[in-house]
Amino acid sequence: MGRLHEKGFTVKSAEVSQDQLRAVKDQHGVPQRLHACHTGLIGNYVIEGHVPGPLITRLLKEKPEITGLAVPGMPIGSPGMEGPNPKPYIVYSFDQAGRIQVYEHIDPTH
């Protein structure tokens, strides 16, 4: 959340149980295979996992007809997961029909 705050986003957080978090993911249509450590809501979109701030800004500007963006797991090199040997990872988009597409390939080594 600190990273998003640094990018100019207003962030409100809530401590919830794993069951409550799963319920939020289900309620907002996050496909099971895209589940990550945390879920955020911004405007009409869901942000799942470690999605880079610039992609959230792009999402809000372009307003595509999707439900949200997701980075499944906790890839080394994603925002908040910096460390040695960062690896490329994929940010996916998803919609209410369950379609999942590549939104952006991220290579933190460049």
Image (cartoon, helix red, strand yellow):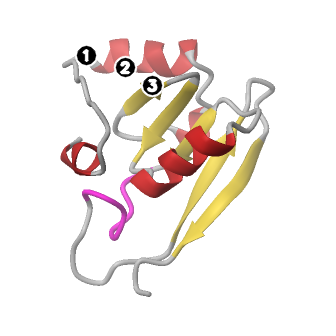
Question: Is 79 contained in the magenta span?
Answer: yes
Q: Nearer the viewer, mark 3 or mark 2?
A: 3
**CA separation in Å, label 3 and label 2:** 12 Å
Which residue is pictured at 57% across the width and 39% down the height? 60
Extent of the magenta region: 73-80
Which mark, residue 94? Answer: none
Amino acid identity at mark 1: Ser
- Disc 2 secondary structure class: helix
Which residue is pictured at 73% across the width and 31% down the height? 95
User: Residue 31 placed where, x, y %?
Assistant: 63, 32
Asked whether residue 71 appears in the rendered view, the answer is no
Tell me: 4 left or right of 24.
Answer: left
Q: How many marks?
A: 3
Q: Main secondary structure of the magenta part?
A: loop
- The residue closer to the viewer here, 69 or 35, is 69
Which mark, residue 41? Answer: 3
